Amino acid sequence: MSVSVTQGCEVLVHFTLTLEDGSVAEATRDSGKPAMFRLGDGSLSAGLETALFGLTVGERRQFSLPPESAFGLSNPDLVQFFLRRDFAQTGVPEVGTIMLFSGMAGNDMPGIIREVAEESVTVDFNHPLAGHTITFDVEVLEITPLQTEVTHENPAGESPRVLCRSRSCHQHCGAGAGGIWRTDLRSS
């Protein structure tokens, strides 16, 4: 039985992401470095995850997603204006530059410099592909199923019980199996 892409799994893929005008926004084959996605961790849109569900290793699929299912619609509230003097330490960036800005909670947020005027700098904090219909051509290279955490008795008969965190639990926890055993610190 072949493993397919499901919620919570990790999937290693090569992909090409193309915009409506045919321009390539990103392609992993160019760099020779595939991308690893973990479905359900919030890094991908629900539409993109749903399109990947059911794929198996070696399978290739091409699909298009409208903006609301891909990277969202452009939100005008995420376009902000700064004074040029706010960039005194870094220097005023050029239009198109992507910079990291410190958010209120201390997290870094990327922003794209959209305009540099005499007194102000316009920064867009929308995803760079927000508002675009995208075509995604993906090839699945590897699937790692959802990692489960199960408590088992140690097959060697030793106590205490152990907590197996293996992705292929049945291969490590059967009688006489090797594997890495972790002490269960919970009371037995």
Image (cartoon, rainbow, N blue to C red):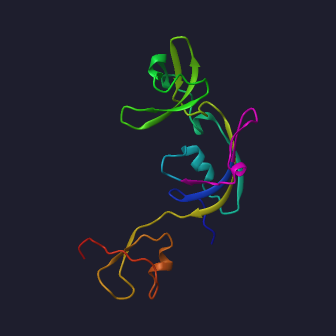
Q: Quadrant of the N terminus?
A: bottom right
Q: Quadrant of residue 97?
A: top right
Image side of residue 45 versus residue 30, left or right? left
9 in the magenta segment: no
Task: State the residue at coordinates (49%, 26%).
Answer: 78
Depicted 166 relative to depicted 77: above or below: below
Task: State the residue at coordinates (38%, 88%).
Answer: 156
Task: State the residue at coordinates (55%, 34%).
Answer: 127
Whole-percent x and y of residue 106? 37, 36
Q: Quadrant of residue 22?
A: top right
In the current view of this chain or complex, which residue is farthest to the top?
Answer: 118
Image side of residue 184 versus residue 181, left or right? left
| Stretch in magenta | 16-38
Whole-percent x and y of residue 147? 47, 65
Whole-percent x and y of residue 67? 61, 34
Whole-percent x and y of residue 166? 46, 71
22 in the magenta segment: yes
Instruction: Give whichever of 107, 72 is nearer the camera.
Output: 107
Instruction: Give whichever of 127, 85 is nearer the camera.
Output: 85
- Asked whether residue 47 is in view, the answer is yes
Q: Quadrant of the C terminus?
A: bottom left
